[in-house]
Structures are given as structure tokens and as C-alpha cells.
Amino acid sequence: MPRATEYVIVGAGPAGVIAAETLRGTDPEGTVVLLCGEDEPPYSRMAIPYLLTGGIGEDGTYLRHTDGHFQSLGIDLRIARAASVDPGKGEIRLEDGSSLPYDRLLIATGSHPARPPVPGMDLPGVESCWTMEDARRIADATKAGARVVLMGAGFIGCIVLEALAARGVDLSVVETEDRMLPRMMDDAGAAMIKRWCEGKGVRVLTSTAVESVMPAASGLQLSLSGGATLDADLVVCATGVTPNMAFLEGSGIETDRGIIVDDRLRTSRDGIFAAGDVAQGPDFSTGEKAIHAIQPTASEHGRIAALNMAGIDTPYRGSLALNVLNTLGLVSSSYGLWQGVKGGDRAVARDDDACRYLRLEFDGDVLVGALSLGLTQHVGVLRGLIQTKTPLGPWKDRLMHDPHLVMHAYLGRAQGAAVRARKV
């Protein structure tokens, strides 16, 4: 009788949890060990801002809510962190000095906050917003009226902005780039979001860098480029993240900005896979290797990697650059190649006063990217058209004149396809 396969998953975020559950369902005889690097039940980092708003309790961040969920599935959930990997021995060494053998290994270690090299970033009162412990400290420090400076107005920064504003603090946002959400929104959309935030009482300083953080008589003082200063009771740093892969040094696993994986989520070493924020894999729109550090990508990575680990050949189509954000009640989204393609066409509808904006990017008659602001009804349709690479035919010209007809285009093409199928 063949020996049961030993599966080890490092990381208990969405990618790791879904992978463990998929493996258990696919290979009931195999052993599944899931390593969690924090002494907390597996949780979603993207839920932490909702914890800070008071919309959920700590248990609302948990990925699974049933007591004994992992045990009931025969998943061995352990609190442990990886120290090194030896592909030759098929072994992972843990920080406590012990080791685990594996036949198939999934690295789903996620990422950690990247702080800029600014003096004073290690002072008490300077926090990230990444872990449950971070959230507890921020909650303690953000009573109504507290002076808070948020460093970074990217995607993560704007999620944190929403949570901090909901706590009634005196909030200032400092962003080094010339606009908010520089990797998600163009100048026009970002200007609307900035004006919206300012209208809600949030001070937003773009094209501004924090040059130092210093203790002050009351809290902290930040020196800014240009000579201005800001006083704060709390500084929250949201200036990007870096994949957790330092423990792979010497393993021979190919890395770049993340762990390089193919269209089966396999790394360069046999039997080792990677998923989630740490994986640099196929991009749906470009075919190049990219990191898309969003929960939908992590979830799909976990499922696809697990199927391939269990011997069920399952190709991955690639991750779609996808961001949907609610900033103080203003919903924005970006999909795919929102900056456009060479030789492509662009359709724009814009209402600055109402903070409504829609930008469509075409390659021929195929929608390849989009931006949307204040138009929630378009979100699912835009994603569907881009992911299906639907030829729009005559609808492309109609959208060039009125981008708001995107729902009509979606339904029109779907009905046309159904008619053609019936004729066949």
C-alpha cells in the first residue's frame, strides 16, 4: 500500500487555509500540516480595518468561525515559523529548532510592512496596521480627537484611512507621490478622491515626504519635505509591503520581487509551490510574472496550487490586476491594463462635481482595462468583460461615445452569443 503523501503549508492566510482545505478534500489519505506564524486563529489582514471601525469584533476577522474547524478536517494547525528549507532532504526547519519532512510544500508566507529609511520610524507611537497586535495598539491610541498621521496613500493606506477616520481622529495623510493611489488611479480620478477626503475633514498632503520622526513634548513631531512639521499622537505607516521569503536563502528556489512560479504555481524546485502575496506568477493581462497582493488572487492561488500538489493538473490563467476601494463612502475600482495599451483606444466619461468617473481602455474591440469612480453598478460588468476578453464588435463604437453603456454592451454580447449557440 503506498505511503500517504505528506503536505506542509507555511502560512495560514487565505492562500494557506484554502490550500489546506482543498488538499484535504482532494487527498483524504494525505497528512496536511498548516503552519501559522502568529499565535492567533487564522485571520484576514484585509478585515483589520473593519475591526478598527468597530464594524466587527476580533472574531469577525477569522477566516473560519466554527470551533475545531481544522481539527475536524484532519488538518494539523500549528503555531510555528519557518527558518529554512532544504529541498534536497525534503525538509523544512522551524525557528524553534525542530524540522518537518514534506513530499509537497506550499509557501504561502505572505508579506510584511516595508518602512522607509526615515529616522525615528522605530519610536514608540509609530505603528503599522498589519497584524492583530498592531490593530490592538492602534485602537488604544486612537480616541476621538487624537492627532494621527498616516504615511502612505496607496491601496492599503486608503483602506487604513477609512478605518482611522471612522474613529473620529484628527487625521493627516502624507504621500510622497504626486497623487493618491498612484498605482491604481490616474490623475483625474486621484484628484477627485483627494478632494472628497478633504471635504470629509481629512488633511491630504501629496508630493510630500516625511524626513524624520522625533519625540516631542506631547507625542511625536514629523519633519516634512519643504520645511513644514506635523504634530502627532500616533503615526501609522502604510508605505508598502515586502514578501516574506528571507528564510529561503540557500534553498535554490528562484526569486525576484517574489518567488517565481509557473502556471501551475510550481517553484523552480521539485515538490515546492508558492501562493498568495509571496508568489510572483502569471499576469492575466500581460502574461508576465507579477505580484498581485490582493485576497482574491491569494484565494485562487491556494486552490490551484493545492490541486497541482495533489496531482490534479490544473493550469492557472493568471491573476487580474484588480482593486476595489471604499474611501469614506466613495467607491473606486481599477482593473487590468487601466493605463491602456500602445495603439489602443480610450473612452472617458467624467463629472468632477459629482465625483463620477469612468475610463475604458480597448485593444481593438476588446476591453482590457478600466477605471471607475462613484459608479458601483459597473464594477462586476467591467471585470467580466475584461476577464472573458469578449470581442465587443459594434458595441465598441457605442462605448466610445458613451462609456456608461457598458452594461448594455455586456448584455448585448451575451444575448448575441446565446442566439448564435442556438443556431448551431
Image (tube, rainbow, N blue to C red):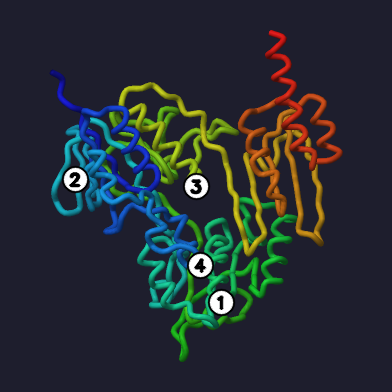
**Badge 4 vs badge 3, beta-carbon distance below 8 Å:** no
Q: Which of the two discs, 1 and 3, labels the residue nearer the N terminus? A: 1
Among all residues in the image, which is located at the extreme front? 66
Q: Considering the image in quadrants, where does the C terminus appear?
A: top right
Q: Position of residue 269 (x, y in %)?
A: 30, 31
Answer with mark 2 or mark 3, whichever residue precedes in sequence.
Answer: 2
Mark 1–mark 2 CB contact (< 8 Å): no
**Do callouts 4 and 2 mark residues in contact (Cβ within 8 Å)?**
no
- Which residue is the site of mark 2? 93
| Vertical order, 424 against 243 (above or below) | above
Position in image of residue 176 (x %, y %)? 60, 64
Residue that carries the numbered disc 3 in the rendered image: 294
Using the image, determine if residue 127 lies above or below residue 269.
below
Tell me the amino acid under the disc marked 3. Answer: Ile
* Mark 3, other Cα within 10 Å: few <14 / some 14–19 / many ≥20: some
The image quarter in which residue 251 lies: top left
Q: Is residue 180 above or below residue 273?
A: below
Within-10-Å neighbours for mark 1: few <14, some 14–19, many 20+: some
Decide if residue 248 is on the left or right side of residue 170. left
Residue with the mark numbered 1 = 168
Q: Nearer the viewer, mark 1 or mark 2?
A: 1
Furthest residue toward right: 401
Residue named by callout 4: 53
Q: Callout 4, which amino acid?
A: Thr
Residue at disc 4, secondary structure: helix
